[in-house]
Image (cartoon, rainbow, N blue to C red):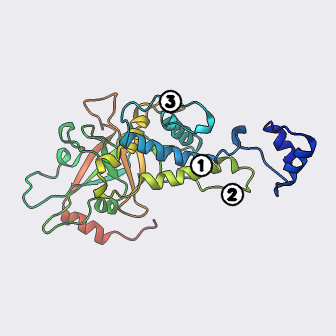
Amino acid sequence: MSTDEVLEEIGFAASPQVFAVVVSSFSIENWVEAPDGIWGTLPLNRELDGAWLNFCNVVRHRTRFHFHRRTSTHPEDGIQPADMLSAIGHVIRNADLVKEIPPGREFFRGRVLRPNDSWSPDANNLGAPPESVARSGRMNPTGIPYLYLAFELDTALAEMGPLEANEVIPVAIFRSEAPLRIVDFTDIPPIPSLFDPEHSASYDQLAFLRSFVDEISQPVDRQRLPDIHYVPTQVMSEYLAQGFETTDDRPLDGVMYPSAARPRGRNIALFPSRATPSAPFGAVAFAQALTWAEVLERALLREPTAP
């Protein structure tokens, strides 16, 4: 669009002489239409980034349970906290991040055993904690246990952090008994070039996903109160577990995300099943427990593999 056309588009009116002076004052001669017809609107990925940061601030420090009321409906005010979760859901669907893990897949879960502990490494003690003692985690709030598993043994060990003297890590192996429907945040498609006409429409959403996954996978600074820091990802996870609409109306079983403790490691957080509350994680079964000696033996004997 020319400068003349832009001024007419925004309703600028003046005498022909003044109009000509205004046009000549612009060094830019060619313009493009703004997103959604709003001049000055941010690219979608930056709007989504800003909306997520605002959402995080709102649910951490303003209101935890009543953020669904819209304070504005004007497009210039961007994505409201009330619309953030559905916006993320829209991006997830567009990027085709809903995947299925077939039955028979092995997962690993460790737990630190201290010298004075009396528990035995078995299915009860290496599974998800009871509701009464479930602490806040990256994806779950206090009192609502999720089952956190690692795809790799090394990742399960890394998630435990450094050991103190005489501490060991028994590891449980779980195996999927049924297909697991998950959102896979570990395999974001590459961001296309802006000059690739076939895929450029997905640029903004994929750029946002990259920064979003980096944000939710960051190690937590313990001085920042992890119970508060995790609130946005807990709210997002509950939305994915209970409010996210899949194309076939099947509920999601969990979220797969990059490990903050091991580069290229992968974790999965399984949601408790609403269909079978007596067996909330029945889609995976305890297969066996590895003693610390067996864990070390596996680590020593395992051949290096491609990441």
Q: Nearer the viewer, mark 2 or mark 1?
A: 1
Identify which residue is drawn at 26% across, 63% down. Answer: 161
Percent across and percent down for residue 32 are 78, 48
| 62, above or below 168, in the image | above
Would residue 213 appear left or right of 137 to someone viewing this image? right
Going from N to C along the chain, the mark reached first, 2 or 1, is 1
Name the mark on residue 259. Answer: none
Q: Look at label 3 and name its amino acid.
A: Arg
Q: Look at label 2 and name its amino acid.
A: Ser
Disc 1 residue crowd, few under 14, some 14–19, many 20+, Cα 10 Å: some
User: The residue tagged with tag 3: helix, strand or loop?
Assistant: loop
| 66, above or below 142, in the image | above
Percent across and percent down for residue 59 are 39, 40
The residue carrying mark 1 is: 45
Percent across and percent down for residue 290 are 22, 58
The residue carrying mark 3 is: 70
The residue carrying mark 2 is: 193
Disc 3 residue crowd, few under 14, some 14–19, many 20+, Cα 10 Å: few
